[in-house]
Image (cartoon, helix red, strand yellow):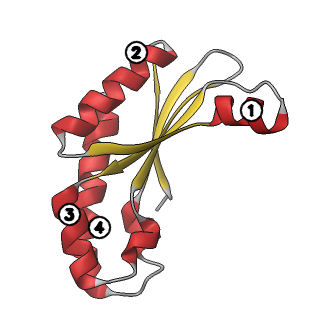
Amino acid sequence: MNYHITKKVNYSYQDALEKTRAALGSEGFGVISEIDLKEKLKEKLDVDFREYKILGACNPKLAYEAIGQEDKIGVMLPCNVLVQEHENGEVEVTAINPMESMSAIGNADLEAIAKEVSQKLKTVIESI
């Protein structure tokens, strides 16, 4: 199993961001944080970098259920979704695979929740 779910898309970077946000919303996720790595690397290191934005996505219902099963699970929340434009112009959308990351915790009660989150994120990526 892979730690991420990835798809190359035939959209501009900006269109991919918009479609990703919309697809996340359709699956019950809200974007609660956003990291523009291109901007931060320019600001902090004065380097030029490609378009690379990390969206922190959270499904409140499933996050609440997960916290009920494992009180420290918050260190693994929110689910990160990455939209990036490679140097060759290809645009790619990637989401974390919670089934893989949750397996490190060793709490069998989280498996059903992780499976549901993984399926929702897979649906998001496939729909873009």
Distance, label 4 to label 2, CA atoms, is: 28 Å
Q: Mark 4 points at which residue?
A: 114
Instruction: Say which quadrant the C terminus sits in.
Output: top left
Q: Earlier in the sequence, mark 4 or mark 1?
A: 1
Determine the residue positioned at 21% across, 69% down.
64
Q: Of the numbered discs in the image, which one, if any, rests on residue 15?
A: 2
Q: Which of marks 4 and 3 is in front?
A: 3
Distance, label 4 to label 3, CA atoms, is: 9 Å
Residue type for callout 2: Asp
SS of the residue at dot 1? helix
Q: Can residue 10 be seen in this view?
A: no
Is disc 4 surrounded by few (<14), some (14 to 19) or many (20+) residues within 10 Å? many
Distance, label 2 to label 3, CA atoms, is: 28 Å
- Quadrant of res 125: top left
Distance, label 2 to label 1, CA atoms, is: 25 Å
Residue type for callout 1: Glu
Q: Earlier in the sequence, mark 2 or mark 1?
A: 2
Is disc 2 surrounded by few (<14), some (14 to 19) or many (20+) residues within 10 Å? some
Q: Is residue 42 visible?
A: yes
62 is higher (above) or lower (below) than 59: below
Determine the residue positioned at 78% across, 39% down.
44
Q: Name the residue under label 1.
A: 43
SS of the residue at dot 2? helix
Q: Is residue 108 left or right of residue 76?
A: left
Determine the residue positioned at 83% across, 37% down.
45
99 is higher (above) or lower (below) than 30: below
Q: Mark 3 points at which residue?
A: 62
Q: Nearer the viewer, mark 2 or mark 1?
A: 1
Distance, label 4 to label 1, CA atoms, is: 36 Å
